[in-house]
Amino acid sequence: MPETKKRKRDADATKARILDAAKKEFARLGLGGARVDEIAERAKTNKRMIYHYFGSKEFLFQTVVEQAYLDIRTAEQELALGHLPPREALETLVRFTWKYYLDNPEFITLVNSENLHQARHVKNSQKIQTASRQLVDMVGEILKRGVAEGVFRAGIDPVQLNITIAAIGYYYLTNRFTGSILFERDFMDPKSLEQRLEFNINTVLRLVEA
Amino acid sequence: MPETKKRKRDADATKARILDAAKKEFARLGLGGARVDEIAERAKTNKRMIYHYFGSKEFLFQTVVEQAYLDIRTAEQELALGHLPPREALETLVRFTWKYYLDNPEFITLVNSENLHQARHVKNSQKIQTASRQLVDMVGEILKRGVAEGVFRAGIDPVQLNITIAAIGYYYLTNRFTGSILFERDFMDPKSLEQRLEFNINTVLRLVEA
DNA sequence: TTGGTAACGCACTAGTTAGTTACTTTGCAT
DNA sequence: ATGCAAAGTAACTAACTAGTGCGTTACCAA
């Protein structure tokens, strides 16, 4: 197995370790709060390698954020919602989005950090735009089928629906710390999580119902 | 007018200028990104005064965040939604929340920053909890009246509804930079803003409808 | 008027941080 | 085997940053 043999020098493996460590650190502390030295240590390499492969902290961040978006868009496409009845398709998307945010907590924090910086790293990514267009198309198709079958009302903007599906999960999770204090309940308790998911499914289905 | 006479030394005025400058800087760059020197400059004072009045950057941030929460909770109470018919009351709350986020963009960024730091500054604020309880009660009362009048369905958790009302506006605005790129439309265009608000009102009313 | 206290400000420190320089080591093509 | 480009490392720097020491100035009570 010459491909998987452990090597003392392996550019690809080092790059991957740096990206993984960077994702965690940027998610934990944001672009401004993350420390390049800390990323190097977590990646079991040193700072020089980061500058060798990525040139700057900013470009490392840009790479991490772009990959994070491509990952979620890929996972969404793999759902193959086109084969499900409209209501089930939407419910599946709501459940998937929720679970994805829970399983990949870095995604939310990375997006927050990118928006704090006015999306300047993502601004020129053609890849992300293309992938997002596919998502909107997918939801648009579901809506169209739902209308044809008489289960959904007409005239719903798929972009608005996408935003809402993301919002009702994302907001709950990104603000879980202040939320738990303001509303005096543990937002991450399994029962609370399940209740929120059910509430969200209900919200979306009532929104599209004929 | 001895009260309003300009004084070269005015502790209250200086404190107020520091808080105002801090709110803007923390909102712009987060707790980590904001610079104490910059806050001092914006407040037309010097760093020493900030440490004199607030002791530390962290405590200054805590003061700013706490005040931001109290401000929005106060404004919500002033809506006096108890006097409106249930549907109008909810629509008014959705419109208010949306407008408040638009008029006070610092609020969203401050909350994001506080959550990045796991709400550790807000953790012990009794005042914020009390104010939030009033909001939940207010929405709870609206729901109760709606059910009694037969226009709302029973069994809706006022906390979940509150979260959703905040979420559908907050998410759109906090992620307006990446959103504008991903979805290839200007999220801050007046027409886009109006469309989103109408969509959100619809979402909430359909959610509670009997 | 004056003495004391609170408000104010300059200039510094001690510690960090992104990025770099100058160097050694590895492994592969020949 | 061996030469050399790529992979890797430690120690450095220049700039920056939160926080402070210490002296000055305005205001008010007496």
Image (cartoon, coloured by chain):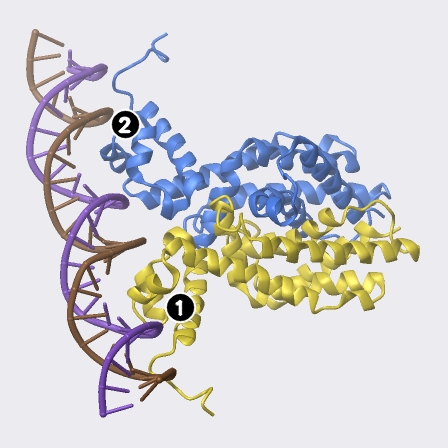
Chain colours: A blue, B yellow, C purple, D brown
In the figure, is residue B55 to the left or right of A80?
A: left
Q: Residue at x 53, y 36 (%)?
A: A105
The amino acid type of the residue labelled 1 equals Ile
Q: Which residue is mark 1?
A: B18
Q: Quadrant of residue C10?
A: bottom left
- Identify which residue is drawn at 79% across, 63% down: B89
**Crowd rating for badge 1 (residues with CA inside 10 Å; few <14, some 14–19, many 20+):** many
Instruction: Give the side of residue A210 with respect to residue A124, left or right.
Output: right
Q: How many marks?
A: 2
Amino acid, disc 2: Thr
Name the side, left or right, on which B124 lies relative to A166: left
Q: Nearer the viewer, residue A49 or B155?
A: B155
**Are circles 1 and 2 on residues that touch, CB within 8 Å?**
no
* Residue occupying the point 29% across, 43% down: A56
What is the chain letter for disc 1? B
User: Residue A201 falls in which quadrant of the image?
Assistant: top right
Residue in front for this viewpoint, B165 or C3: C3
Reply above or below: B206 against C11.
above
Q: Give the mark toward the camera: 1 or 2.
A: 1
